[in-house]
Amino acid sequence: MTAGLLRSPTSADRRARVAVAVLFFTNGALFANLLPRFPQIKADLGIGNAAYGLAVAAFPTGAIAAGLMAGVLIRTWNSARVAVAGTLLTGVGILAASVANSVLLFAAGLFVAGAMDAITDVGQNAHGLRVQRRYGRSIINSFHAVWSIGAVTGGAMAAGAIALDVPRGPHLLVAVVLFSIVACVALRFCLPGPDTDAAAGHDVGDPERTAPARGLRTTWVLAALVVIATAGTLVEDAGNSWAALYLAESLHASAALAASGYIALVGAQFVGRLLGDRLVNRFGQRAVARAGGLIAAVGMGTALAFPTVPGTIAGFAAAGLGVATLVPAAMHEADELPGLKAGSGLTIVSWLMRVGFLASPPIVGLVADATSLRVGLLVVPVAGFLVIVLAGVLKGRRW
């Protein structure tokens, strides 16, 4: 941080912070309104598990296809505008998927939603980091905590609509229109002007290094940041895709108790994000990431070494707490890498992270089929150890 940015935030900065939090909230709430409707859509379309799996994979496929466009769009139109435009178009894709009368249209809607969600994600994080630079201290983790609140809110809205027998079309139309209006209002309070900020270190060379050396170091740091961010998403996927299955099938927990693994992970992750900014401001990104990697590795490693239902639930909670700040930390560091155009580092890390996230479920599944799901879940402690090793690319205390 430059000395000029170490100042108290203005009222405009505070309004921008609230506005970015609103964008994160709407992003979390939009897709969460559709997810609980998937079983109904599958039944109405009369498709099997294989066709359903391929259709649902269109969402991350769209994200990967469009994700690299985000940096160019941000430099052209401003990160806040890109985030809001992406939110509106994500809503269009979600609405199309919800009323699709064929598996192809369902997949097409998810492809559009995934593509626009990836652009929204980079845009809102870029603007959040821009606001953070105005604050002169870490606030990015609080935005990701608000995203979690949005996801819970969207899921609750969908559950309520299902309980009241509200058809998918009207339900999703109301949700999309509501959150689109909220996002457009938030845009009025975001920071104006372009995203080129000297404090971010964009397009700045290091006179002490030759160009090839700078390029090599930037490539190495970007690769390490991608692994750190992917480690965070791998652990999240372990909770999303495998926690309930492992508890129910391997440890013979009841269906209600098996759901506790996922709940423990996301709940602890939310708590970690609420506390994350305070910890980062006090100890620095590097120390927090290393401590988090250790908590995830030891917590889940112990749970897998001595498998019990309570221990496994506690292990998933430790994993969620440990990785809570990893994705925001990697995005922050990537956005401030010198020698890159505004938004480029953030875009690359976000895009490659999604590639890793798409690859992780089949990898765990293949390992589980060849050995056991318990062995497959070793991906969690391995991810924690990788973070410990690579956290040196993150900055120490700077605020």
Image (cartoon, rainbow, N blue to C red):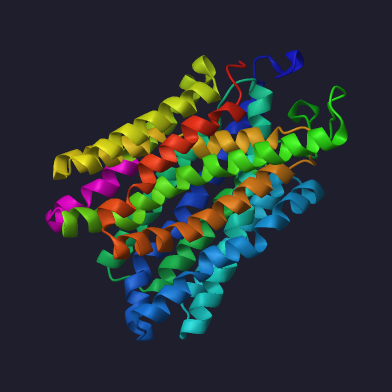
Write the start and end of the magenta stretch as one range. 251-266
Position of 219 compared to 372: left or right?
right
Q: Is residue 53 magenta?
A: no
For the point 29% across and 38% down, the residue is: 301
Spot occupied by residue 170 in the image (x, y as percentages of width and height)? 43, 71
Give percent across and percent down for residue 163: 25, 65
Residue 166, image quadrant = bottom left
Residue for point 33% across, 75% down: 40
Q: Is residue 19 visible?
A: no
The answer to whether 166 is drawn above or below residue 206 in the figure is: below
Q: Main secondary structure of the magenta part?
A: helix
260 to the left or right of 340: left
Q: Horizontal placement of 13 versus 161: left or right?
A: right
Q: Residue at x 29, y 39 (%)?
A: 300
Name, please, the residue furthest toward the front: 370
**Quadrant of the frame with the C terminus:** top right
The relative height of residue 398 versus residue 348 in the rendered view (above or below) is above
Tell me residue 234's x, y (percent).
Answer: 43, 49
Q: Nearer the viewer, residue 118 or 243?
A: 243
Give residue 274's position: percent from left, percent from top. 42, 30
